[in-house]
């Protein structure tokens, strides 16, 4: 694939700016920079995961607070809406300590990654959406990962205390680092990048 759709190109550019924020841990900015370096080269095998889940219907509510803003998050919200028909959707159905309702009350949207708007396997760029008052299960994975928060929400790493990095802030997860997230009174929306294939 030598070209990518304009809506994917636009979102990648906006997301890259958000992941450069000094509100993120330095290690998170570094892993994100490696992801966006890979994304300079389009790659798409054409696979699409278009199955929709109940939580997909909450995307508009999560984007509503800033979709008209003249900010990076406003631009990201509008770009995400433009991408919605092409997103790849998935959800987790296993893990420990998740709230009783978490399966139907969360969803992941893939922009660049397996089954996403640009389906590829070396990196992932996507987002997690949760309804209010949802606790995502404890989990871990080999890829290194960085998050940026669009909305209020809390994270937990290695069984430690819950903390809210603040809107525009985020976290960095090293490989196989146990972590979880939870929403409060409003929908939770956070963007993430994973470096799924490394050079080492």
Image: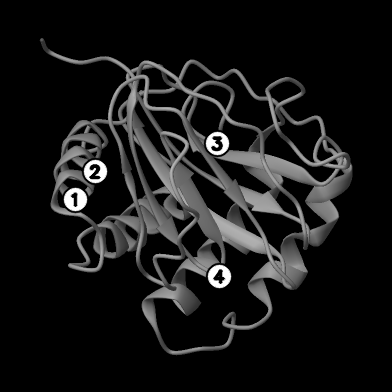
| Secondary structure of residue under mark 1 | helix
Q: Residue at x 17, y 35 (%)?
A: 34
* Neighbourhood count class around disc 3 (C-alpha, 10 Å): few under 14, some 14–19, many 20 upward: many
Please name the residue that numbered disc 1 is placed on. Answer: 29
Q: Is residue 59 left or right of residue 114?
A: right
Query: Sequence-wise, which precedes: disc 3 or disc 2?
Result: 2
Query: Sequence-wise, which precedes: disc 4 or disc 2?
Result: 2
Q: Position of residue 133 (x, y in %)?
A: 77, 60
Q: Are marks 3 and 1 in contact (CB under 8 Å)?
A: no
- Residue 151 — which label? 4
* Neighbourhood count class around disc 2 (C-alpha, 10 Å): few under 14, some 14–19, many 20 upward: many
Q: CA distance from mark 3 to mark 1?
A: 23 Å
Q: Residue at x 23, y 31 (%)?
A: 41
Please name the residue that numbered disc 2 is placed on. Answer: 32
Depth check, mark 4 against mark 2: the one in front is 4
* Neighbourhood count class around disc 4 (C-alpha, 10 Å): few under 14, some 14–19, many 20 upward: many
Q: Are marks 3 and 2 in contact (CB under 8 Å)?
A: no
Q: CA distance from mark 1 to mark 4?
A: 19 Å
Query: Sequence-wise, which precedes: disc 1 or disc 4?
Result: 1
Quadrant of the frame with the C terminus: top left
Query: Sequence-wise, which precedes: disc 3 or disc 4?
Result: 3
Query: Sequence-wise, which precedes: disc 3 or disc 1?
Result: 1
Quadrant of the frame with the N terminus: top left
| Secondary structure of residue under mark 3 | loop
Please name the residue that numbered disc 3 is placed on. Answer: 117
């Amino acid at each position: 694939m030598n070209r990518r759709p304009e809506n994917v190109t636009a979102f990648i550019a906006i997301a890259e700016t958000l992941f450069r924020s000094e509100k993120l841990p330095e290690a998170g900015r570094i892993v994100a920079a490696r992801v966006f370096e890979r994304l300079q080269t389009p790659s798409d095998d054409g696979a699409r995961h278009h199955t929709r889940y109940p939580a997909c219907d909450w995307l508009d509510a999560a984007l509503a607070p800033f979709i008209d803003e003249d900010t990076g998050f406003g631009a990201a919200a509008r770009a995400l809406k433009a991408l919605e028909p092409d997103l790849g959707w998935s959800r987790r159905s296993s893990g420990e300590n998740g709230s009783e309702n978490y399966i139907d009350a969360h969803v992941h949207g893939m922009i660049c990654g397996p089954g996403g708007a640009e389906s590829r396997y070396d990196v992932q760029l996507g987002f997690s959406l949760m309804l209010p008052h949802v606790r995502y299960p404890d989990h871990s994975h080999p890829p290194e990962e960085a998050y940026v928060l669009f909305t209020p929400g809390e994270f937990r790493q290695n069984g430690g205390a819950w903390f809210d990095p603040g809107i525009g802030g985020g976290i960095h997860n090293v490989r196989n680092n146990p972590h979880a997230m939870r929403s409060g009174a409003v929908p939770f929306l956070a963007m993430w990048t994973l470096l799924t294939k490394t050079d080492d």
